[in-house]
Amino acid sequence: MNKQEKAVALFGGVLIAGMLVASGCDWRERIEVKAPAAIPEVLDFEPPLMLADAERAYEEWTAWVERTDAAFVASIEKAEERYQFVHQWTSVGLSVVGTASEGIPYGGLLFGALTGAVGLMLPQPKMPKKKEPPKP
């Protein structure tokens, strides 16, 4: 064998040995997953997130989202119940006061003025603002 053939054989042997060593490594420990910024904060781990840990992190993230979503929905439902209670009693109170004001002189005017003042205190509907396109 001449030098060129020996070099090619040596290079091939080194290449095959390198591939065998590389195939024995767990590359999932070396490959980084670019997770959104909120995930490390919520799951309380230090970035970077490696591919080997990605499935466990995804399961924890999904469980956190489900817990948080359920708590948020329950909170909205409780707030809606409180609103319904307050709204019902204010409606009953206004109807009682309206009926009682009929027996008082100028009671209708007084009741109208009070309900107008209450109407001014109600929150105004928010009109959506037109978004301007971003400037280049």
Image: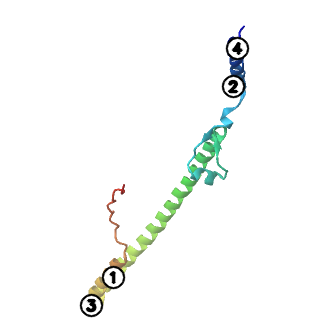
Give the quarter of the figure containing the C terminus: bottom left
Q: Nearer the viewer, residue 89 or 119?
A: 119
Residue picked out by circle 4: 9
Q: SS at mark 3?
A: loop
Q: Nearer the viewer, mark 3 or mark 1?
A: 1
Q: Nearer the viewer, mark 4 or mark 2?
A: 4
How far apart are labels 4 and 2 at the CA level?
Answer: 21 Å
Q: Judge whether 116 appears above or below 11 on screen.
A: below
Question: Furthest residue to the front?
Answer: 3
Looking at the image, is mark 3 or mark 1 earlier in the sequence?
3
* Residue count near mark 1 (Cα–Cα under 10 Å), binned few <14, some 14–19, many ≥20: few
How far apart are labels 4 and 1 at the CA level?
Answer: 96 Å
Q: Determine which quarter of the picture holds residue 102.
A: bottom left
Horizontal side of 65 relative to 87 (left or right) equals right
Q: SS at mark 1?
A: helix
Looking at the image, is mark 4 or mark 2 earlier in the sequence?
4
Q: Determine which quarter of the picture holds residue 128.
A: bottom left
Q: Disc 3 marks which amino acid?
A: Tyr
Residue picked out by circle 2: 23
Residue picked out by circle 1: 117
* Residue count near mark 3 (Cα–Cα under 10 Å), binned few <14, some 14–19, many ≥20: few
Q: Nearer the viewer, mark 3 or mark 4?
A: 4
Looking at the image, is mark 1 or mark 2 earlier in the sequence?
2
Looking at the image, is mark 4 or mark 1 earlier in the sequence?
4
How far apart are labels 2 and 3 at the CA level?
Answer: 94 Å
Q: Disc 2 marks which amino acid?
A: Ser
Looking at the image, is mark 2 or mark 3 earlier in the sequence?
2
Q: SS at mark 4?
A: helix
Residue picked out by circle 3: 106
Horizontal side of 65 relative to 46 (left or right) equals left
How far apart are labels 1 and 2 at the CA level?
Answer: 78 Å
